[in-house]
Image (spheres, coloured by chain):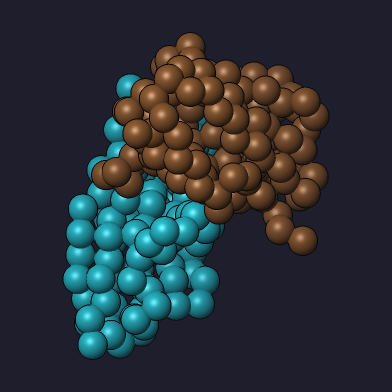
Chain colours: A cyan, B brown
Amino acid sequence: GQNIDQPTEMTATEGAIVQINCTYQTSGFNGLFWYQQHAGEAPTFLSYNVLDGLEEKGRFSSFLSRSKGYSYLLLKELQMKDSASYLCAVTGGYQKVTFGTGTKLQVIP
Amino acid sequence: DTAVSQTPKYLVTQMGNDKSIKCEQNLGHDTMYWYKQDSKKFLKIMFSYNNKELIINETVPNRFSPKSPDKAHLNLHINSLELGDSAVYFCASSQRWIGTSDPRGETQYFGPGTRLLVL
C-alpha cells in the first residue's frame, strides 16, 4: 500500500530555519513533491525531487533519499507568510499519486 | 486568465439532493484530477482522467460520477448527497500523466476548491 508520514504540527520563529520531514512507503516511485497550502486556499507547488540529493530554490530546499524513503523540506529565513500547511506527495505505484496528511507550520514573531 | 477554475466556490445543500461541480483548465494539460479534502485536511484523490480517459477511480461511492467532455474540462456529479460528503473538493491538472518521461509534467495545479456543506 501507500503510506506517507509527516509531523502534524510545527512551530518556528521568524527569521529561523525549519526542517519538515516526510517518510514514505509506496509500491512505486516516480518523484516526490512538496506543496504549500495556506488556510482556506488551494495547494500550490513548491518543489520536486526525482534523484537523491538536495534541490535548492531560493529560501526553500528539498532533499530526497530514495533508499531511506525519506525527504525533507527546508525553509530558511522564515517569514510570517510561511505559516501554512506543507504537503508531501509521492507519484508512482498503484495509486499513482498519494499525499501525506500535511504539516501545519506556525511562524511566530 | 485563471489556470484552473472551479464553480461554484461554495455549495450549501440539503441531504438527498443532486449537485454538480465544474472544473476547467486553460493550461493545455492532458491530465485532470478530483480530490476531496476533509476536515482533518487530508487530501485524497478520487478520480483522474488522462486525455478524457478515466485512469484512476478510487474507492468512492457510486453516487460520485465524473465526466470529461474534453481535455480541458472535468466535472463531478454527486447524487443523493449525504452529511459525510461535506468537504472541500479540489480539481487539479498536470501536464502529463504519471510515469511519463519528464517528472516535471506530474506537477499539479489546483483550482480554488469548492466548499460543499450538506445539511
Asked whether residue B43 is in view, the answer is no
Q: Is residue A64 above or below residue A24?
A: below
Q: Residue at x 49, y 55 (%)?
A: A42
Indicate the quadrant containing the C terminus of chain A: top left, top right, bottom left or bottom right: bottom left
- Give A93 or A52, whichever is nearer the viewer: A93
Which quarter of the picture shows residue B84?
top left
Which quarter of the picture shows residue B106?
top right
Asked whether residue B68 is in view, the answer is yes
How far from the left and from the top, in percent, is residue B79? 51, 18
Q: Is residue A2 above or below residue B88?
A: above
Q: Residue at x 52, y 58 (%)?
A: A44
Q: Left of A65 or right of it: where is B40? A: left
Q: Is residue B116 above or below residue A44?
A: above
How far from the left and from the top, in percent, is residue B78? 52, 23
Q: Residue at x 34, y 81 (%)?
A: A80
How far from the left and from the top, in percent, is residue A77? 36, 84
Indicate the quadrant containing the N terminus of chain A: top left, top right, bottom left or bottom right: top left
How far from the left and from the top, in percent, is residue B9? 55, 49
Q: Is residue B49 above or below residue A4?
A: above
Query: Extreme top residue here?
Result: B62
Q: Residue at x 53, y 23 (%)?
A: B18
Q: Left of A91 or right of it: where is A6? A: left
- Give A33 or A106, whichever is nearer the viewer: A106
Which quarter of the picture shows residue A11?
bottom left
Figure label count: 0
